[in-house]
Amino acid sequence: MKAAIAAAMTLALAQMAARPPEVPVPGTDIAVRRGWRVAFADGCRWAAPADWRVDGGGAVSSPVGARLLVASVPVASWTAHKAQARAALDRGAIVHEDSERRLWIESRRDRWIEHYVAVNGGARACVGVLDLPATVNEAGDLATAIARSIDAAAGAATRVPR
Protein backbone atom coordinates (compact mmCIF):
# COMPACT_ATOMS: atom_id res chain seq x y z
CA MET A 1 0.00 0.00 0.00
CA LYS A 2 2.82 2.44 0.89
CA ALA A 3 4.56 1.60 -2.38
CA ALA A 4 1.39 2.40 -4.36
CA ILE A 5 0.97 5.75 -2.59
CA ALA A 6 4.63 6.60 -3.14
CA ALA A 7 4.33 5.70 -6.84
CA ALA A 8 1.20 7.82 -7.22
CA MET A 9 2.86 10.81 -5.54
CA THR A 10 5.96 10.44 -7.72
CA LEU A 11 3.79 10.37 -10.84
CA ALA A 12 1.81 13.43 -9.71
CA LEU A 13 4.99 15.40 -8.96
CA ALA A 14 6.47 14.45 -12.32
CA GLN A 15 3.33 15.62 -14.11
CA MET A 16 3.34 18.91 -12.21
CA ALA A 17 7.00 19.46 -13.06
CA ALA A 18 6.33 18.73 -16.75
CA ARG A 19 3.75 21.53 -17.00
CA PRO A 20 5.07 25.04 -17.46
CA PRO A 21 4.15 27.30 -14.53
CA GLU A 22 1.16 29.56 -14.98
CA VAL A 23 1.15 33.18 -13.94
CA PRO A 24 -1.80 35.54 -13.43
CA VAL A 25 -2.36 38.32 -15.95
CA PRO A 26 -2.59 41.57 -13.95
CA GLY A 27 -6.06 43.08 -13.86
CA THR A 28 -7.81 39.88 -15.03
CA ASP A 29 -8.93 36.50 -13.72
CA ILE A 30 -6.72 34.79 -16.32
CA ALA A 31 -3.63 32.68 -15.70
CA VAL A 32 -1.36 31.69 -18.60
CA ARG A 33 1.98 30.02 -19.11
CA ARG A 34 4.94 32.19 -18.23
CA GLY A 35 5.97 34.20 -21.29
CA TRP A 36 2.68 33.77 -23.12
CA ARG A 37 0.62 36.65 -24.49
CA VAL A 38 -3.07 37.14 -23.80
CA ALA A 39 -4.95 38.95 -26.54
CA PHE A 40 -8.43 40.46 -26.49
CA ALA A 41 -10.41 41.42 -29.59
CA ASP A 42 -14.00 41.48 -30.77
CA GLY A 43 -15.31 40.29 -27.39
CA CYS A 44 -13.00 37.24 -27.32
CA ARG A 45 -9.74 36.36 -25.63
CA TRP A 46 -7.01 33.82 -26.22
CA ALA A 47 -3.41 33.13 -25.28
CA ALA A 48 -0.38 32.19 -27.37
CA PRO A 49 3.39 32.10 -26.89
CA ALA A 50 4.90 35.58 -26.69
CA ASP A 51 7.07 34.96 -29.77
CA TRP A 52 3.94 34.66 -31.92
CA ARG A 53 3.39 37.77 -34.06
CA VAL A 54 0.12 39.68 -33.66
CA ASP A 55 -1.13 40.08 -37.23
CA GLY A 56 -4.25 42.05 -36.28
CA GLY A 57 -7.92 41.31 -36.66
CA GLY A 58 -7.79 38.45 -34.18
CA ALA A 59 -4.91 36.70 -35.94
CA VAL A 60 -1.52 35.64 -34.61
CA SER A 61 1.21 33.51 -36.20
CA SER A 62 4.27 31.66 -34.97
CA PRO A 63 7.84 31.70 -36.27
CA VAL A 64 7.34 28.11 -37.57
CA GLY A 65 4.18 28.91 -39.53
CA ALA A 66 1.41 28.06 -37.07
CA ARG A 67 -1.60 30.39 -37.29
CA LEU A 68 -4.50 31.25 -35.01
CA LEU A 69 -7.53 33.30 -35.98
CA VAL A 70 -10.17 34.15 -33.36
CA ALA A 71 -13.42 35.98 -34.08
CA SER A 72 -16.81 36.54 -32.52
CA VAL A 73 -19.61 35.19 -34.72
CA PRO A 74 -23.40 35.44 -34.37
CA VAL A 75 -25.08 32.21 -33.26
CA ALA A 76 -28.85 31.80 -33.52
CA SER A 77 -28.69 28.30 -32.04
CA TRP A 78 -25.68 26.74 -30.28
CA THR A 79 -26.93 23.25 -31.15
CA ALA A 80 -27.25 24.17 -34.83
CA HIS A 81 -23.84 25.85 -34.84
CA LYS A 82 -22.20 22.73 -33.44
CA ALA A 83 -23.98 20.50 -35.96
CA GLN A 84 -22.87 22.70 -38.87
CA ALA A 85 -19.27 22.77 -37.64
CA ARG A 86 -19.18 18.99 -37.23
CA ALA A 87 -20.69 18.44 -40.67
CA ALA A 88 -18.09 20.69 -42.31
CA LEU A 89 -15.13 18.70 -40.97
CA ASP A 90 -13.68 15.36 -42.02
CA ARG A 91 -15.23 12.15 -40.77
CA GLY A 92 -11.87 11.27 -39.25
CA ALA A 93 -11.88 14.36 -37.04
CA ILE A 94 -11.23 13.97 -33.31
CA VAL A 95 -13.79 15.62 -31.03
CA HIS A 96 -11.96 16.79 -27.90
CA GLU A 97 -15.00 18.49 -26.38
CA ASP A 98 -18.66 18.82 -27.28
CA SER A 99 -20.52 20.50 -24.44
CA GLU A 100 -22.97 23.32 -23.82
CA ARG A 101 -19.95 25.58 -23.30
CA ARG A 102 -17.37 24.51 -25.89
CA LEU A 103 -16.91 22.62 -29.15
CA TRP A 104 -13.32 21.57 -29.93
CA ILE A 105 -12.58 19.46 -32.99
CA GLU A 106 -9.18 18.44 -34.37
CA SER A 107 -8.74 17.43 -37.99
CA ARG A 108 -5.74 16.66 -40.18
CA ARG A 109 -5.15 17.62 -43.75
CA ASP A 110 -1.93 17.09 -45.63
CA ARG A 111 0.86 18.36 -43.38
CA TRP A 112 -1.42 20.46 -41.14
CA ILE A 113 -3.35 19.86 -37.95
CA GLU A 114 -6.40 22.11 -37.58
CA HIS A 115 -8.19 22.77 -34.31
CA TYR A 116 -11.64 24.34 -34.49
CA VAL A 117 -12.74 25.76 -31.13
CA ALA A 118 -16.06 27.50 -30.52
CA VAL A 119 -17.13 28.83 -27.13
CA ASN A 120 -20.82 29.47 -26.51
CA GLY A 121 -21.52 33.05 -25.53
CA GLY A 122 -25.29 33.03 -26.05
CA ALA A 123 -26.14 35.12 -29.11
CA ARG A 124 -22.46 35.05 -30.17
CA ALA A 125 -19.66 32.52 -30.05
CA CYS A 126 -15.92 33.04 -29.89
CA VAL A 127 -14.52 30.85 -32.66
CA GLY A 128 -10.86 30.03 -33.03
CA VAL A 129 -9.17 28.15 -35.85
CA LEU A 130 -5.64 27.01 -35.02
CA ASP A 131 -3.49 25.60 -37.85
CA LEU A 132 -0.29 23.86 -36.80
CA PRO A 133 2.30 22.25 -39.05
CA ALA A 134 2.23 18.51 -38.28
CA THR A 135 5.98 18.72 -37.71
CA VAL A 136 5.73 21.07 -34.72
CA ASN A 137 7.17 19.34 -31.65
CA GLU A 138 4.64 18.95 -28.86
CA ALA A 139 1.85 20.24 -31.11
CA GLY A 140 -0.76 18.50 -28.95
CA ASP A 141 0.34 20.28 -25.77
CA LEU A 142 0.55 23.62 -27.56
CA ALA A 143 -2.86 23.14 -29.16
CA THR A 144 -4.43 22.15 -25.84
CA ALA A 145 -3.12 25.24 -24.07
CA ILE A 146 -4.26 27.57 -26.85
CA ALA A 147 -7.64 25.88 -27.32
CA ARG A 148 -8.43 26.07 -23.61
CA SER A 149 -7.51 29.76 -23.54
CA ILE A 150 -10.13 30.77 -26.12
CA ASP A 151 -13.10 32.32 -24.36
CA ALA A 152 -15.45 35.29 -24.31
CA ALA A 153 -14.00 38.46 -22.78
CA ALA A 154 -14.34 42.20 -22.80
CA GLY A 155 -11.53 44.58 -23.68
CA ALA A 156 -9.17 45.26 -26.53
CA ALA A 157 -5.63 44.96 -25.21
CA THR A 158 -2.71 42.58 -25.53
CA ARG A 159 -0.84 41.67 -22.37
CA VAL A 160 2.27 39.62 -21.69
CA PRO A 161 2.65 38.59 -18.02
CA ARG A 162 6.19 38.72 -16.63
Image (spheres, rainbow, N blue to C red):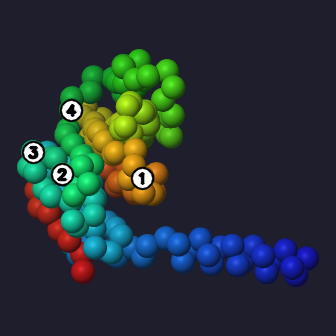
Gap between marks 4 and 2 measured at Cα: 18 Å
The answer to which of marks 2 and 1 sits earlier in the sequence is 2
Residue that appears at 24% across and 49% down: 65
Residue occupying image coordinates x 21% and y 65%: 51
Q: Quadrant of residue 78?
A: top left
Q: Could you tell me residue 112's position as x and y percent?
A: 36, 38
- Counting residues from the start of the chain, the first of labels 1 and 4 encountered is 4
Label for residue 5?
none
Q: Which amino acid does label 4 sit on?
A: Val
Amino acid type of the residue that numbered disc 1 sits on in the rendered structure: Ala
Vertical side of 122 occupied by 155: above or below: below
> Within the image, what quadrant is residue 21 found in?
bottom left
Q: Is residue 68 left or right of residue 5?
A: left
| Tag 2 near tag 3, CB within 8 Å | no
Near mark 2 (Cα within 10 A), the count class, few <14, some 14-19 or many ≥20, is: many
Q: Which of the labelled discs sits on residue 57, or is there none?
A: 3
Per the rendering, the mark at residue 139 is 1
